[in-house]
Image (tube, rainbow, N blue to C red):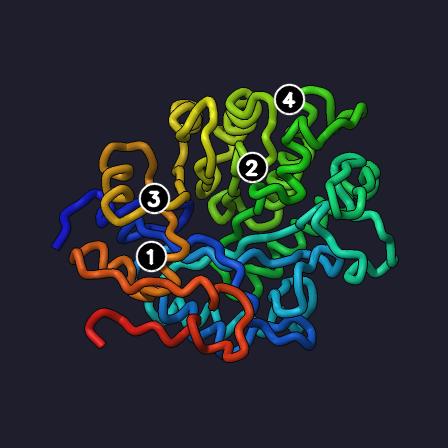
Amino acid sequence: MSTSTAFSPLQLGRFTLKHRIALAPLTRCRADKDGQIPNALMAEYYGQRASDGGLLITEATPILPVTRFADTVPCIYTPEQVEAWKPVTEAVHAKNGVIFMQLWHIGFHCHPRYDPDQRNAPPSSSVYEREGRPTSRELSVDELKEYVKAYATAAKNAIAAGFDGVEIHGANSYLLDQFLSDKVNTRTDEYGGSIENRSRFPLEVVEAVIAAIGADRTGIRFSPWALEPSDPVAQWSYVLERLNPLNLAYVHLVEPGRPADFKDLTPFREVYKGVLIYAGGYEADTAKESIASGRCDLVAFGRWFISNPDLPARIQNDWKLTPYDRSTFYAAEDPVRGYTDYPNFEE
C-alpha cells in the first residue's frame, strides 16, 4: 500500500480531505432529455466514484437555458433540476465523500436553438469569428451584470441540492476564458484592453459566488493556454494574485495540451498561495510525484476515473487499471455501457 503524500489529509475550504485524488469534471450526457434532469443512473455513477474524504467535481452544469450544450446535459436553473440533484449528493455523502458542482456558461459555443430570444449570434466577450460557426456578439455591460447574478443563483441552487461547494468553470475556451484571452476579448470598455480589465468579469463572478455561498465553498478552474492568449503567464498570474486574499477552497488548473513557452504550471504555483488542483493526462505515478514534490496539492483524473470507479484505492494499492472505452464517453445507445458498468478491483 502506498504511503505517498497523495494519501495524506488536506484542508480544502471547510472540508478535510483524506486523500488527494479527485474526480475531474467530465461531460457524460446521461441526463433525462425532458428538462435536463439528473436521474438515478447519475446518482449511481457518482456514488460509485465517491470515497471517504475524497473530492468529486461534477460534469459542467449550465446555469441558464441559453448555455445548454445538449439535451442530455444536466442543468441547475429550475426547481425540478435542483430537486433531482439531491439523490446524487446523497449518494456521495453516504460514503463520506465531498462533491462540488461545476458551473458552466459556454459563451460563443452556445447554440441558437437553446436561446430563448432566438438569436443566431452566440454571446461572448467580443464579436469573434470562427470558421464554420456563427460569429459571436459582444455582451453588453447590463447582460454581464445579469450573468454575474446567474452564477450566484446557480451556486445557491447547488447548495440547496446538497452540494458541498461549486467550481466556477473558467477554462477550456468557455465564457470566462473568452474574457481572459486577448485573442478573443477585443473590447474597448472596462472589460477589455488590459490584463486588469480582461480579468474584471471573471473576478466579479467569483466575488458574487463567494457572497452567495462563502469562499470556503468556492473553487474555480482555468486553462491558461486554451485560447492561445499572447501572454498566459502574465494574464493568469494577475488573476491568481487577485484571488489570493479571497481564500477560495481551491484553484483548479489544466496543463497545456500542446507545446507552449511554459510547458507546465510552475509559474502559477509560485504565485498562488492556496490549494491547487492540477489536471491533464496524469498517470498514477506522475500524479503521486507531482503531489509529493509540491507542484500541486491534488490531481484530478478524468478518463481513468471513468473506467475505475475505485481509482483512489487502485492508485494507493498499485492495483491494475481497467482501460477506458472512448466510444462510451458521451451518449451511447445503452446509457449504462461505459458509465456504471465498470467494476471495482475486487469484483
Q: Earlier in the sequence, mark 2 or mark 3?
A: 2
Instruction: Farthest residue to the front: give it.
Output: 132
* CA gap, disc 4 and disc 1: 35 Å
Dot 4: within a 10 Å radius of its alpha carbon, few (fewer than 14), some, or many (20 or more) residues?
many
Q: Residue under label 1, please give it.
A: 54
Q: Residue under label 3, please give it.
A: 298
Q: Earlier in the sequence, mark 3 or mark 1?
A: 1
Q: Is residue 337 left or right of residue 10?
A: right
| Rendered location of residue 233, percent (x, y) | 51, 23
Q: Residue under label 2, please give it.
A: 226
Asked if residue 96 can be seen in this view, the reply is no
Labelled disc at residue 113? none
At 62% across and 38% down in the image, what residue appears? 177
| Rendered location of residue 86, percent (x, y) | 52, 71
Q: Which marked residue is nearer to the observer: mark 4 or mark 1? A: 4
Q: Is residue 195 left or right of residue 256?
A: right
* CA gap, disc 4 and disc 2: 17 Å
* CA gap, disc 3 and disc 1: 11 Å
Q: Earlier in the sequence, mark 1 or mark 2?
A: 1
Instruction: Farthest residue to the left: give it.
Output: 1
Q: Earlier in the sequence, mark 3 or mark 4?
A: 4
Secondary structure found at label 1? loop
Q: Are marks 2 and 3 in contact (CB under 8 Å)?
A: no
Secondary structure found at label 3? strand
Q: Are marks 1 and 2 in contact (CB under 8 Å)?
A: no
Asked if residue 184 can be seen in this view, the reply is yes
Q: Are marks 4 and 1 in contact (CB under 8 Å)?
A: no
Amino acid on which disc 3 is placed: Leu
Dot 1: within a 10 Å radius of its alpha carbon, few (fewer than 14), some, or many (20 or more) residues?
many
Amino acid on which disc 2 is placed: Ala
